[in-house]
Image: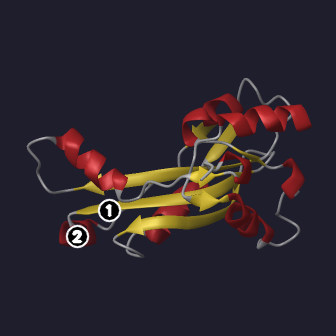
Amino acid sequence: MRGIRSRMLSMVATFALPMHAVLALVASTPVATAPRVDELLVVAAQDLPRMWVIVRYGALKFDRRKLRDHGHACVSVGYVIEPDGRTSTARVLKSDPAGVFDASALSAVEKSRYKPGSRNANRAPVYTTATYTAFVAPAADPARMLARVSSSCDVEIVLPDARPKR
């Protein structure tokens, strides 16, 4: 297990959330649902399909009136995928506008289901993130608008041994 965890940690994306904060999120859940911290892998969203493949998306419902009022929305959620493919320990890491669409994003994550990926025959639980974005303002360049909205919710996980030396 240790070798697998070391390889997985080398594939982890960097978030602006220190590992102790990730572990605190997991440790704050009831004992019955929290995975053992020494067995929890931290996996970047882009590497997740190797470990877990989504089989059911939770419906994301942004209130259209609120979305029109703000012009955009983005919410980044950190969560654990349990050995049975269900999610737990979902927490909003960052959102813009703050607090307006958080419940919607949490609900979508909680309703999502996963099956083991090609590198996860033993169904190891993982911690990962998802970022949801939406905008209604017509833009001359939708890709640029999406990048701008997404950047306001980007998060990185920085592992203690991966921090740049000063």
Residue at horizontal 65 percent and vertical 57 percent from the top: 79
What amino acid does circle 2 point to? Answer: His
Q: Would you place residue 46 above or below residue 18 in this image?
A: above
Residue at horizontal 80 percent and vertical 50 percent from the top: 40
Residue underneath mark 2: 70
Q: Nearer the viewer, residue 112 or 165?
A: 165
Q: Nearer the viewer, residue 166 or 99?
A: 166
Quadrant of the image occupied by residue 11: top right
The reply to whether dot 2 and dot 1 touch (C-beta < 8 Å) is: yes
Helix, strand or loop at label 2? It is helix
Q: Is residue 46 left or right of residue 114?
A: left
Residue at horizontal 70 percent and vertical 29 percent from the top: 117
Residue underneath mark 1: 73
User: Which mark is on residue 142?
Assistant: none
Q: CA distance from mark 2 to mark 1?
A: 7 Å
Residue at horizontal 42 percent and vertical 66 percent from the top: 95
Q: Is residue 133 left or right of residue 56?
A: left
Task: Give the farthest residue toward the top.
Answer: 118
Q: Is residue 61 visible?
A: no
Residue neighbourhood size for the residue with mark 1, other residues' Cα within 10 Å, grouped as few (<14), some (14–19), many (≥20): many
Task: Give the farthest residue toward the left.
Answer: 140
Task: Give the farthest residue toward the bottom.
Answer: 99
Where residue 55 appears, x then y in whole percent? 60, 37
